[in-house]
Amino acid sequence: MQGGCACGAIRYRLTAQPTETSWCHCSHCRKSSGAPAVPYTTLARSGFRLERGEEYLRTAKLTDFAERLFCSLCGSPIATRLDHQPDEIDVTVATLDDPEALPPEFHIFCTSEVSWGRHEDGLPRYVRNRRDGETMP
Ligand SMILES: [Zn+2]
Ligand SMILES: [Zn+2]
């Protein structure tokens, strides 16, 4: 699977099979994307290969445990790396050339969800992350 940013400066390839795909409704994803929620797919960090544009890739640290990778030319959010998941990377599904290939399986951080952005898709809705297991009432 291949993908890239909106302006085309950054191109990447996924060489590992993603393990899970979900919508994130947290406020950092909302604000940094300009959209009510962001779908991510999780895969082995070694399976994320930058093919072009490394010089345009920048990182933003909005918390002390997460690093967001984005294109410095067009602003597209590309991926997030979490310190507590050192072997994994979360790649933005909507920057894939074929986002249809990875439909989300659940929602996380639903406590921050924007009501008008809600998808009545029947998928599990977690209050925070899935590892906590707590679902929305
Ligand atoms: Zn770009
Ligand atoms: Zn988020």
Image (cartoon, rainbow, N blue to C red):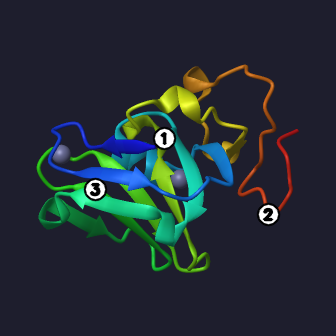
Label count reads 3
* Nearest-to-viewer mark from 2 and 1: 1
Callout 3 amino acid: Phe
**Residue found farthest to the front:** 15
Q: In this rendering, is residue 117 above or below 46?
A: above
* Nearest-to-viewer mark from 3 and 1: 1
Callout 1 amino acid: Val
Residue at coordinates 64% horizontally, 45% vertically from top-left? Answer: 21
Locate residue 10, reporting x and y percent: 21, 51
Q: Residue 64: which numbered mark, if any?
A: none
Question: Counting other residues with Cα less than 10 Å from the Cα at mark 1, is it few (<14), some (14-19), or many (20 or more)?
Answer: many
Residue at coordinates 47% horizontally, 53% vertically from top-left? Answer: 91
Residue at coordinates 48% horizontally, 40% vertically from top-left? Answer: 93
Q: Nearer the viewer, residue 9 or 34?
A: 9
- CA separation, marks 2 and 3? 26 Å
Q: Nearer the viewer, residue 88 or 108?
A: 88
Sequence-wise first label, 2 or 1: 1
Sequence-wise first label, 2 or 3: 3
Q: Which residue is mark 3?
A: 70
Q: Is residue 107 left or right of residue 85?
A: right
Dot 3: what SS? strand
Cβ atoms under marks 2 and 1 closer than 8 Å: no
Dot 1: what SS? helix
Question: Counting other residues with Cα less than 10 Å from the Cα at mark 2, is it few (<14), some (14-19), or many (20 or more)?
Answer: few
Q: In this rendering, is residue 53 above or below 123?
A: below
Q: Which residue is mark 2?
A: 131
Callout 2 amino acid: Arg
Examine the image and state in which quarter residue 102 appears: top right
Residue at coordinates 12% horizontally, 66% vertically from top-left? Answer: 55
Q: In this rendering, is residue 75 above or below 102?
A: below
